Amino acid sequence: YTSADLNWRDKSSRSSVEMDDPTSRPAIIDDLKNLAEYDTVYLGFPIWWNQAPRLINTFLEKYDLSGKTVIPFATSGSSSISNAESELRKAYPDVNWQKGKLMNGVTEEDIKNWTKK
């Protein structure tokens, strides 16, 4: 995404158009070859309009994460992660969702400690 794509004040920007359409599923360019090898997946994204970007839906629908442990983490200018977590849990109930974390202002040490838990 370019800076223009991310301009949330422009209703015709890519991010605004995608988030305005709940059925939008932006394409993923590269395929993950070895996702089946993992039991736990950390899923990171920015919060857009109090939700995960539509690209996260594309990812979750492209790759079968049923039964895998998925731990979301996010950054946000003003929102918490709670609504995004709730929406993802409802949309993808076969995933073993764990409590997510908002990563604003965390240090590398904080991240290391969090991922060890």
Image (cartoon, rainbow, N blue to C red):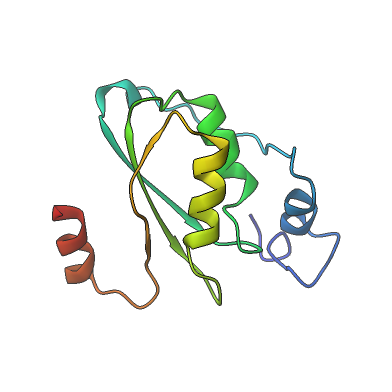
Left or right: where 60 falls relative to 97: right
Left or right: where 41 falls relative to 23: left
* Number of numbered callouts drawn: 0
53 over 63 or under it: above or below: below
Left or right: where 37 falls relative to 109: right
Q: Nearer the viewer, residue 84 or 108?
A: 84
Q: Say which residue appears at 17% left-offset and 61% top-offset.
A: 112
Image coordinates of residue 40 in percent, x first then y, are 27, 36
User: Which corner quadrant holds the C terminus?
Assistant: bottom left
Q: Nearer the viewer, residue 4 or 80?
A: 80
Q: Say which residue appears at 40% left-offset and 74% top-offset.
A: 104
Picture quarter containing residue 29? top right
19 over 97 or under it: above or below: below
Image coordinates of residue 21 in percent, x first then y, are 79, 46
Left or right: where 88 falls relative to 40: right
Q: Nearer the viewer, residue 29 or 35?
A: 35
Q: Say which residue appears at 73% left-offset and 53% top-offset.
A: 19
Image coordinates of residue 42 in percent, x first then y, are 33, 46
Residue at far right of view = 12
Image coordinates of residue 93 in percent, x first then y, are 48, 33
52 over 59 or under it: above or below: below
